[in-house]
Amino acid sequence: MTVVVTGLGAVSCFGSGTGALWEGLLGASRRPDPAPDVCGLPARPHLYAAPDTGGPEGGTGRTGALLATAVAEAVAEAGLTPQDLCDAGLTVGTSLGDIDLAERPEGTAPPFPATHRVTASLATRFGIGGPGQTLSTACSAGAYAVAWGAELIETGQADIVVACGGDAFSRVAVGTLERFGLLDGECCRPFDADRAGMVTGEGAAALVLESAASAERRARPAQAVLAGHGWSCDAHHPMAPEPSGEQLRRATARALAGLGTTPGAAVLHRAGVALNDTVEATAVSEAVTAAGGTGGEVLGYAPKAVMGHTAGAAGVFGCVIATLVLRHRLVPPNAHVTTPDPDCPLSVPLDGPAPLPRPSVLVSGTGFGGNNAVLTWRAAA
Amino acid sequence: MSVQIIGAGAVAEEPRPGGCDPWFDPAAHLGRRGWKYLTPATRYLLAAGNEALGRRHDDPPLTGTAAERFGVVTGTQYAIARVHHRMNSVLSTEGVHGISPAEVPGFSMNTPGSQLAISTGARAFSVTLTNPVTAGLEAVQFAVTALRTGRADTVVAAATDQAPEDHGGSGEYDAAAAVVLSVRGRTPGPAGAARPLATVTGGLSRFLPPGPAGDADPAALAASAARVAALARGTGGVRLAVGAPPAAAPLATAVHDAVTKALADDGTPVRDPAAGGIRPARHCAASGLLDLVTLARAGGPALLLSISELGHLTAIGLHSADTVGSEFI
């Protein structure tokens, strides 16, 4: 069964809306701001902060509020009615959920508030009555939320699924990443040879996934078509990737098999952590080569340079960006590169938006625990 | 395609008046080594998962094709709660240098499931689901779907939680549970050629937000109940069990009554109603899976629902192990 995209939504450091996201990506200049908390460090760390999108409602924290903004945009663009939504599915990727509820000053909140009720909050708010899951596979949660949403449609459990992901600032997360040297003190620069780690970002993104038959019935245009998705687990280490990238390569191969051609671009998970970046680019390139292409034919893109690592939202952002790339037939330039990474086998546009050579885009998601999900998209006919 | 439960395991803290001793002995389940730096929820999950798979903790993980056809899906709602609470306090009092490297992996919801995947060699996928209460039964629904789409031949569907407070202080208790699911006729996988406990007739998930009085919209309730009842078609009668925390009691009662009516409309009798009914879900996200393990071990057709006070509903249908040809619904 063919799965298509009929609606997009996003809120990021560029503000609300996919229009602001696309402009920000094309601008390729955004740098992080100081975080709102010192996080137990000598000085405030960096954060690609999202704007406030309205006060938390009904016990929902900041992540829930960001998600509601992104979902509202996607639902409106897809033209979904309350009747459409009452049987629709909802898949939410989030790493920490409404973790801000648990980081309030001691004595001002219950010690163990419910952080992972974001899916219920969204389902209540939008009247989404079908299957609803929260996926927390660390930094690939968003990619898995989209893949699981597609799986629900492909197995007839839903005709329409709102697939989304979100994460907001956590002082504990940022402090811990800094403590162990995983943060770049300058900015996120994934394609620079001197990259020194990730920088966290806030945001939420959403896609309306739909069976092609449902979109046709509702007379909504398909913005992108899901060609394939592959899953795998390194089963190697709770935090580090398996160095050979064998399992990521296997997931990529399955996603490419659905596409049947070399993708024009790859929206990479690439976050500025050298080992992880190298494993990912090598695995993607090797899978492309095994399928008859070459890595050099694929335009690699790392949006985290200008929007930070949005954790559970990252994979959904990747799919939203892939859809925008297909819409505009352009790949935004990679930002913050002084010395290009010499070990990346993919082509890396740097100086300006590059024309998309073929109307297909690969999106990869990796995370702690070696949780890999890779999706391929093609333009609608 | 027929999905069978070929193994089950569980560890659970039960209410004990005045009891303050640790209820779980990791060495008894996991041996002397290899668990010191793992969170309690991770230890529980490994114990339940190993029991379900019929393996010891120090058995080598799967490799090669068998590993690539073997997946793990884990439900949890509190995996990081205590670690996060401690780290947050440490940041305020000692700064980041008070955080130990050994405790960092515990600050990720997927770490229990990832440790089970590492220990057993699950390379098809390792997915963690985190809806409160229902995530455990959702793991079964996820696993059945992934088996149906050919993403694995064998999947451990599991759940684990350490309650926020010890000894039931929050009204919740620690537990983990796991079932091994496999497609009939495919490679038996890591659990070996075990005798199946039950066949899964299907699973589904719905959302029924409770209204001000705690019950659900009547039309949505009836529609969901009809879908749930359809999981029991062809069984000739089922036990019906609905698990819900006390805060969800009005919704659970409404769902139980609606499903009972839908089963009657379908001509499916409810067997042994005294043994079923509404069960208190005291073990966080592991509650539904604990009930599933009990029902699967008891044998025979059953319909199991897990309901949260937020409105999540997950249902799994079971049939006798020798049932052939049950189709996913």
Image: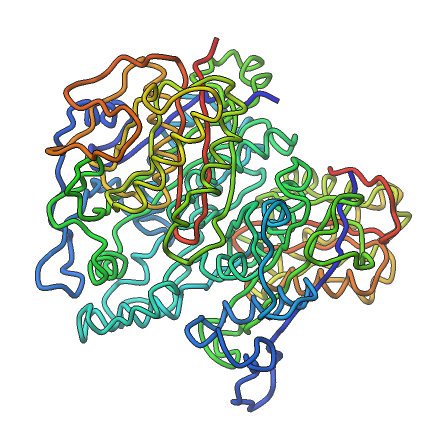
Position above or below: B23 against A40: below
Tell me: residue A193, above or below residue B256: above
Asked if residue A131 shows in the view, the reply is yes
Q: Residue at x 36, y 62 (%)?
A: B107
Q: Nearer the viewer, residue B71 or A153?
A: B71
- Residue B313 appears anywhere in the view: no
Tell me if residue A283 comes above or below residue B312 in the rendering: above
Please state the horizontal and vertical placement of residue B124, each as a whole percent of the image.
Answer: 57, 45
Q: Quadrant of residue A87?
A: top right
Identify which residue, B33 or B272, lies in the foreground. B33
**Which residue sits furthest left?**
A43
Residue B12 location, quadrant: bottom right
Query: Where B2 sits versus A351, above or below?
Result: below
The residue located at (86%, 53%) in the rendering is B320
In the rendered image, the quadrant that contains the N terminus of chain A is: top right
Task: Indicate how the structure is coloured in the image.
Answer: rainbow
Q: Which residue: 76% across, 49% down?
A: B317
- Taking the view exactly as shown, the residue that stands out farthest to the right is B236
In the picture, measured across the screen, residue B84 lies left or right of residue B31, that is left
Image quadrant where residue A374 sits? top left
Q: Please state which of residues B211 and A309 is positioned toward the viewer in this rendering.
A: A309
Q: Position of residue A309 (x, y in %)?
A: 27, 43
Q: Is residue A307 left or right of residue A2?
A: left
Measured as percent of width and height from the top left, residue B132 is found at 51, 57
Residue beneath the point at 20% across and 40% down: A51
